[in-house]
Amino acid sequence: MPSITRRDFLKVSALTIGAVAVSTGLTGCKLTDDRAVSFTHGVASGDPLQDAVIIWTRAVPATDPATPVTVRWEVATDAEFTNLTHDGEIKTSSDHDFTVKVDVRRLTPGQTYYYRFTAGNETSAAGRTRTLPEGDVSQVKLAVMSCSNYPAGLFHVYREAAGIDDLNAVVHLGDYIYEYDGNGYATQDAEALGRTLPPENDVEIIDLVDYRRRYALYRTDTHLQTLHAAAPFIAVWDDHEITNDTWREGAENHNEGEGDFTTRKLNALQAYFEWMPIRPVIEGNEEMIYRTFRFGDLVSLHMLDTRVIGRDKQLDLNSYFTGSGFNTAAFEADLTDPNRTLLGAEQRAWLQNSLAQSNATWDVLGQQVLMGRMNLPYELLLNLGSDSVAGLFAELATLKARYLQGDSTLTDQEIARVTTTLPYNLDAWDGYFYERETILETARAQDRNLVVLAGDTHNAWASNLTTLDGTAVGVELATPSVTSPGLESYLQLNEAQTPDAEQALTILVDGLDYTNLSQRGFLVVTFRPEAVEADWRYVSTVKSETYSVDMARSARRRTLPGASNRTLQPLT
Ligand SMILES: [Fe+2]
C-alpha cells in the first residue's frame, strides 16, 4: 500500500480544509487545469458530523494522466449555489484513482447543503447532503441497506431510497460490491440484465487495480449515483468488499494461490477508502472504521466492524458431525469459549465504553451480521433445501405452538423435535456466543435502549433481544438485500408456501418476531423520543426495468424506550 502518497493526499486535503474556512464566493474562482476533465462517476457525500461532511467525486483527465488534476469544490445552502458558504481547491492523481475527497469543516448543524465540483471546463452534477443535528432532536430517519450485487439484479432499491426527501442518512451495512468473476455467485442473469462484468474486470478481484475497477463499475449505475447525490452515506464494509467470509487473517474465498491475504485485504481497503465517502477514524489508517455518529440527544449510532479488525475464524458446523452423530460437547465448548471474539478486545472495550458514556435516547448498533439467537430445530436444519421442507415447517411449528401452550399430551420425542436446536449461521454473532452475551449484558447494565441494525443475510428479520435470563434489552432490525438472492434460492419454497414458512419460523425461533424469506428491499427506521418505527419496503422484482413497490408485503414494527418496553410491537 503506498502509504506515503496517501499521507501526502491527506496533507493536501487538510491544507485545503484550512484554506476554506470562510467562503470566498464565486468571484474568487481560479481554474488551474486547462485539460478536458470528466466527472465519470457522479458525486457522493458521507460521514456527516455536526460541523463537517465528506464530499466525493472522481475527476479523470483526458490527457497526460501522469499530471495531477486540480479540482475546485463548492458548498452552498441552496441548489442554485447562490448562497455559497464554503469552497476550495484540491489535487488528485492516478495515485488515488483520480478520486477526490474533501472533509468540509465549519458547517452548521442540522443544515442541508448542496455541493459540486469543477475541473477544466467541466462541472459535476450537484449533490445534496445534511449535517447531523444537535441538542433536542425530534426525528431522525435512516434508510438501511446492504448486499448490492451488480450482476444479480437492478438497483431499484437505491432509486426508491433516493425518493425519500427527509432522510438524515443512508446507512449501508456492507457488501456494497462483490468480489467474484463473471461466472461467480449470483451472475446467472447478468447477461439478460445487461450487467456482465467488463472484460478487463472479469476476474475475482485481488489486486488494487481490480478492486478499483469493480467500484468504478458499480458507480456507473444511475440509481446508485442518484442515491449518493441525494443523501450522505454512513457505511461499513462486510466481507465481500474484501472476499467471502473474511475474518481477521483469512477468508473462505481466499487461497494461497491468490497470494498473501494481508496484501489483498489492504488493496481492498485502500480502494474502499478511495471510492467511499468515509472519513478515516485515524488519518492514514484504513483498517479501523468503528465510529459513532451523534444525532443530538436522540440517537447515538455506533458503526461496528464485525468482519476485519478483530474477528476470529468462523466455526465450521460440518466439522462436528462424526461417524456417531453430532458432537454436541465439542461444539458447545468451542462455541462458548470466552476468548472467541468478533469485535476484537479493543473494539469491544470501545463499544462498552461508548454505551456507558451515552446519554442518547436510542443507542443504535450499525453493523453487519445478525445478533439475535437464530436457533433452528436440528431436524429443520438437516432438511433445508429438501422437497419436504414446506411440510416440515408446518409440522414443527404446530408442535412448537403446542409446546409453548404447555400441552401435556406431547411426547418426549415430540418435545425433543422442537427443543433440539442449533444456530443456523456461525458467521453471525451466533458463532461468537460469549461476546454477544457480553454486549447484551452491557446494554442492560447501562440501561440503554438498544436498536441493532443488521444486513448480510439478504433477508428481512426482526428480533427481540434478551439477555440469557430473558430480560428484554432491545430489538434487532435487519434489512433485506438490494439484489443478492436470499433464502428463497435454496429453501425450495414456492410463492404460496413462503408466507406460511415465515410464520412458522417466528414460532420456531425464540425471539424472532418477523421475517421475509423471499424479497429484495430495504428498511426505513424513524427514531423519535417516544418510539422507533421500522418500515420494511420491498420491490416486486430486481430482474426487470419495470417494477413496483410491493405494498402488500411491506411490514412495520415499533418499539418504545424504557426498561419495560424493549420489545417489538405490531404497527399498521
Ligand atoms: Fe451479501
Image (cartoon, rainbow, N blue to C red):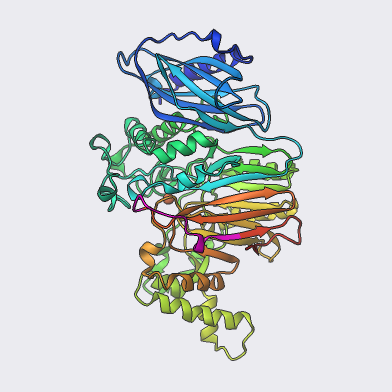
Q: Residue at the far bottom: name it.
A: 409
Residue for point 39% across, 21% down: 95
> Looking at the picture, how far across and down is residue 19, in whole percent?
59, 12
Q: Is residue 135 visible?
A: yes
> In the drawing, does residue 18 fall left or right of residue 36?
right
Q: Quadrant of residue 257?
A: top left
Eyeballing the image, is 103 above or below 291? above
Q: Quadrant of residue 171?
A: top right
As rendered, which of 468 and 50 lies closer to the eye? 50
Residue for point 61% across, 52% down: 452
> Looking at the picture, how far across and down is residue 361, in whole percent?
73, 47
Find the magenta span and give its range. 543-556
For the image, the number of numbered tags is: 0
Q: Is residue 421 visible?
A: no
Quadrant placement of the C terminus: bottom right
Residue for point 42% across, 16% down: 119
Please tell me whether residue 552 belongs to the stretch shown in magenta.
yes
Please tell me whether residue 179 belongs to the stretch shown in magenta.
no
> Looking at the picture, how far across and down is residue 515, in whole percent?
52, 63
> In the drawing, does residue 219 fall left or right of residue 278?
left
As rendered, which of 460 and 463 lies closer to the eye? 460
Residue for point 47% across, 53% down: 521
> Looking at the picture, how far across and down is residue 134, in whole percent?
72, 35
As rendered, which of 273 and 542 lies closer to the eye? 542
Quadrant placement of the N terminus: top left
Eyeballing the image, is 258 above or below 481? above
Q: Main secondary structure of the magenta part?
A: loop
